[in-house]
Amino acid sequence: MEMLSKEMLKNAIGYWDNRAQSIIKFKGGEFYTERKASIPYYIYRRNKTLYLMDKLDVKGKNILEIGCGTGYYCRYLKKRGGEVIGVDLSNNMLKLAKKYAKNSSLGILFLKNTAEDMGFKNESFDMILSVTVLQHNENSRLKMIVREMSRILKRGGKAIIFEDIAPKKIEVRMDKKGMIQLFRPVGEYVSIFKRYDMKLTSHVTLSSPFYASAMHPYNYIHNRVHIPPCMELIYPKICVEITKLLDKIWQTEGAGMGYFVFTKGCDEDD
Ligand SMILES: C[S@@+](CC[C@H](N)C(=O)[O-])C[C@H]1O[C@@H](n2cnc3c(N)ncnc32)[C@H](O)[C@@H]1O
């Protein structure tokens, strides 16, 4: 069996522990209340994610969130009646997750582990969620994670995946601290999940081609362009309105946020 290199794991833990430290400094302490909180697109995107999650039947289901970070979605799913476990490789993220869940008196189990090998019994979960986690794992790790998901997911169970995607081929970005972000085309996820007996049964792309090209230089802190302060106020709002419109009228496989449901051991479409 392939092993995750110690060096790789150490780097990932160090990176996400530091990210958690910087989250604490921001009001609210949620992942998206970092710099992104004030950016209308990210607010819109998170609301869209919740809108899609609202459609899932979670009551009484055993749900696992891999890469749960500060536990935002764990709390959300627990409040909707799910039995929820959150797993993350970062202690600092988990400290925050536990703190917030305790504050809202929720009985969520948070465990430190890598998604590649979580040690749960075979077929333990009805649903496994991943929100912007797989995109931070290169292909060898992705395959290990998907294999593990398939092992612990019940037959007919669902893997719910939200990841940034690219239109045709993998786009690799790296931030200043060296964390990679892999924008994979939908087909790449489909073929890897298929290998482990999970079939794509539902797919929506929050289509942000306009946003991605128009706003990316503004948003992306490393190559951020400076625009006049008055434009800083209106430009993101205009862009998000156009993006909302595009999402209504244009289903695309292109750049944006991919929402996938993979069902284990299923031949029929949902
Ligand atoms: C971008 S954050 C997303 C957090 C959360 N899903 C959310 O949307 O608020 C990615 C999280 O995944 C965790 N992570 C990344 N790769 C992981 C892996 N292989 N195993 C477990 N956790 C991982 C990181 O520690 C981090 O907390």
Image (spheres, rainbow, N blue to C red):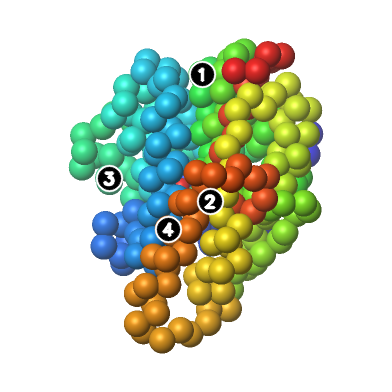
Kind of residue at disc 1: Asp
Picture quadrant where residue 73 is located = top left
Q: Comparing marks 3 and 4, which lies closer to the viewer?
A: 4
Callout in the foreground (2, 3) = 2
Identify which residue is drawn at 61% across, 66% down.
213
Residue sitting nearer the eye, 141 or 257: 257
Give the spatial CA distance, label 2 vs label 3. 35 Å
Q: Which mark is first along the chain, 2 or 1?
A: 1
Residue to which mark 4 is pinned: 241
Disc 4 vs disc 1: Cβ atoms closer than 8 Å? no
Q: Is residue 233 above or below residue 96?
A: below
Element marked by disc 2: helix
Q: Which residue is mark 3?
A: 100
On whether ligand 1 comes within 8 Å of the CB at mark 1, the answer is no
User: In the image, which is nearer the foreground, mark 4 or mark 1?
Assistant: 4
Q: Is residue 160 left or right of residue 174?
A: left
Q: Residue 108 in the image: x percent, y percent?
A: 34, 31
Say what amino acid the circle numbered 4 marks: Glu
Which residue is the site of mark 2? Answer: 246
Q: Which of 95/184 is in front? A: 184
Dot 2 or dot 3, earlier in sequence = 3
Identify the residue under disc 1: 126
Badge 1: residue crowd in 10 Å (few <14, some 14–19, many ≥20): many
Q: What amino acid type should be assigned to the residue bearing mark 2?
A: Leu
Assess disc 4: are there few (<14), some (14-19) or many (≥20) residues with their C-alpha within 10 Å of its C-alpha.
some
State how far apart marks 3 and 4 are (Cα).
32 Å
